[in-house]
Image: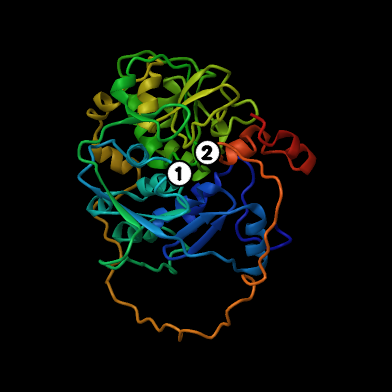
Amino acid sequence: ARESGMRHFYDSNVTILHTKFYRDLVQPGQVVLGADSHSSSHGGLGAFSIGLGGADITAAMVLGQSWIEVPEAIAVDYTGELQFGIGGKDVILETLGKLGRNTVAMERTVEYRGAATREFTTDMRFTIANMTAEFGGLNGIFEADEEVALWLATRKSENTGALYFRADDGAPYVARYPIALDKLGPLVARPFSPDNVMEIEKAAGMKIDGCFIGACTTTEEELVLGALVLEQAYKDRPARPASAKQLVVPGDLSIQARMRQGDLWRHYEKAGFRIGPPGCSMCLGVASEKALPGEVWFSSQNRNYENRMGQGSLAWLASAATVAASSVEMKAADPRPYLARIDRERFEKLLFRDKAARGPEIRTSEPSIAAPAAGGAKAGGAAAAAKTIAGKVQRFADHVDTDAIIPGQFCHLVKFEELGEKAFHF
């Protein structure tokens, strides 16, 4: 990396790629390509960001360009005011539960719109855009607004190239889907799909074997909220020894430092959580950090497919606050009794937010577009030379994803022969 003059290089245990990129590098209006499906995260800041294969990314890095067909677009229109502590994870689980995985969003741009989004923090938008991958969208995107401008103003660099695009009032969409949030409570997704959603009340009291708070989906905002839930839960409880079945992993060393600055890690430690270095950790079930066969885990990660957290594991998805509340007695639990006792002003301060701060003013202006003259290219070409190819086709079930193609615990393999032996392993 030094020899090539690479500006941004991060070694192991420093960051999860999406977390660092979103917080420190990406700007609105950019086209971002990433070698992971959750590259969609950066749409939270108003970037057109998609995940592609490693070869596609290598080509883009070498050539400085790529070829992308402009996708169809759907709009998800959010209305209503969220209760305190109900965040991005609950919003996207509600969206998945209502609209379904790999259905209306499949291979399309998902524009997250509506009056409610103006109150979404950049962390909330990250989580929603992140799980556009589970929704089935090619990418997810929010309109960059004053909230985003205020976030960029806190950066020391990578903050002067933003382009604040906004859809026209009459912009055409394949479809628009309204989702009301004013009555939304904590949600969980049962195995083995992120759209297998139910209210936490319906699972309350269910015994669980482990709790994981982390992965790229879990933002600083969620980590702080989880700590404050545990602070309330353990006010009148003795500390617990560190457990092999309770793990919290920050997305970046900078978040780890800010959590330490706010003295928040002690609440996780008092509740028996081990604190791991930044990384995907149990979300991929790699190395020693994985669930055992038949174990039920509550996790704030983004996927709960078969074997995702380890062979035979049973992963339930939830927000960090819900996972934290459930860890207290190792039973599914509603976090709202703890959330109600949290000092909201202190919560904002622990996130280094200044409610009085003002970001740059954003003025709306219409661009002047000059379209090229129609015609020019001759008909035929590649299409005319197309041939019919006959052969056998291997068909798979619905919803085949990267977890099915090469399960997480085999992602470290690099030789084609080894990958071939483990492809579609389960």
In-image side of 93 versus 424 (left or right) = left
Instruction: Give coordinates of residue 106: x percent, y percent.
Output: 45, 49
Quadrant assignment, res 333: top left
Q: Amino acid at mark 1?
A: Asn
CB atoms of marks 2 and 1 within 8 Å? yes
Mark 2 secondary-structure assignment: loop
Is residue 63 shown above or below 319?
below
Mark 1 secondary-structure assignment: loop
Quadrant assignment, res 357: bottom left
Quadrant assignment, res 311: top right
Instruction: Give coordinates of residue 33: x percent, y percent.
Output: 55, 58
User: What residue would you read off at disc 2?
Assistant: 398
Taking the spot 36% from the left edge, 67% from the top edge, the residue there is 165
Q: CA distance from mark 2 to mark 1?
A: 9 Å
Q: Amino acid at mark 2?
A: Asp
Report the mark closest to the observer, 2 or 1.
2
* Disc assigned to residue 102: 1
Taking the spot 45% from the left edge, 23% from the top edge, the residue there is 269
